[in-house]
Image (cartoon, rainbow, N blue to C red):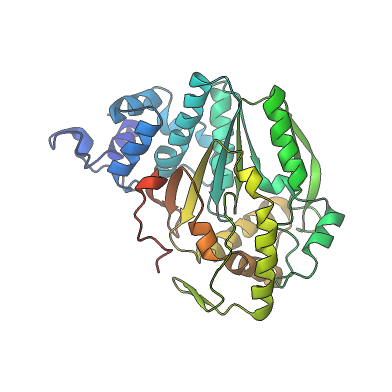
Amino acid sequence: MSSIARTALNIIKDSNSYPASSPWSASIDPEISFPIQPFEKLLQDLGWSEPLKWLTHWLNRGGTNIASSDWPRGIRSDWVWGLGLPLLSEVERFLTTTTEYVLIGISGLPGCGKTSLGHWLEASARKMNWPIAVISLDDFYLPAEDMVKAMKGNPWKVPRGLPGSHSIELIESTIDNWRKDGNLVAPQFDKALRNGLGDRSGWRRANPKVLIIEGWFLGCPVISQFSEDIEINNDFLAKISKNEIEYRQRVQEALAKYQPIWNRFNRLWHLKASQYNSIASWKTQQEKNMLKERGTSLQGQSLDLFIRMIQTSLPYQSLLSINSNVVARVDSTRKVAWVGRKIDEPKDYLYGL
């Protein structure tokens, strides 16, 4: 048995669909530990009632070897089998069952790995000649001068990132125009410009049938009432200041303008942090990588304040309430701990509280 096959077989270990004597029940790959039953229900939603046929389908296309060089930090079998290939299965389902243009969203905290996943999805699709494109909500940040005005007065002194820092009309028109004729014309944003403050850097043109957009608060609903007391998220303990409380309301008002955008998505996948404070280490690592690769990034107090903004600008209830179709819980080491349909997610889950 090949190493690829052994990796694949492990994801349906302990499945009740197979006898105990079956090799499918063997624990082989320690990187894969998410429970199988909710995963099998997800596969059924994606059109695969028999996991063995799904595994065979992707093993025949290369399994973990698909676009393996496009994972920037190396291949992780839990991400390939738990997220990458199911997402490609979602894409394949739409490519083969509808003539309409399909919009899929990926939501997840900064640094969790969604951008790397998006790059891999595009690379894999190219190898199969599938017409898809992956862009970021961040590509729609306002131009530099408008961004400065929009972000003026925020208590975290961040240059971007908050609801309200994007061009809403441009997002809507980009999606709507693409859906008319399949021609995608979207802006590109380079976070390394302006010494790490970022700015627009051109336009991207493509003709995808499936468009994927990723963003850290993508899908977040407006929360009309939220706690203004101390919030505890695992070992993150924050006293929300008066200025932060007041600005939170402005953030919610800005977030309301994004709701018509969320309604345009056909499907939404949520990469949910098992520990909300993981953002600190994730974002720090992300900026270190940018410094190494581009020579500039957020550092020192600017980075600390950006992390603080992510942790406090939106109540965690908002991130928990994303109305996604699929949920993948990612722990502090970015390991996929659970993946399945939103309706099957355990209800007692509140960022470790």
Residue at 66% across, 50% down: 258
Q: Quadrant of residue 262?
A: top right
Relative image position of residue 122 (x, y in whole percent): 58, 32
Quadrant in which the C terminus is drawn: bottom left
Residue at image point 60% right, 56% down: 286
Q: Residue at x 63, y 59 (%)?
A: 288
Residue 294 horizontal/vertical position (percent):
72, 51
Name the image quarter holding residue 158: bottom right
In the rendered image of this protein, does residue 189 appear above or below residue 60?
A: below
In the picture, the quarter occupied by the N terminus is: top left
Q: In the image, 193: left or right of 46?
A: right
- Residue ID at (57%, 31%): 123
- Residue lying furthest front: 224
Residue 142 seen from this side: yes
Q: Nearer the viewer, residue 301 or 293?
A: 301
| Res 161 seen here | no
**Relative depth, front residue between 306 and 316:** 316
Can you say whether 95 is above or below 296 in the image? above
- Image height of 284 relative to 236, above or below: above
Q: Nearer the viewer, residue 79 or 165?
A: 165
Q: Position of residue 231 (x, y in %)?
A: 51, 74
Q: Is residue 96 above or below residue 14?
A: above
Q: x and y percent of residue 87 in the render?
A: 48, 35
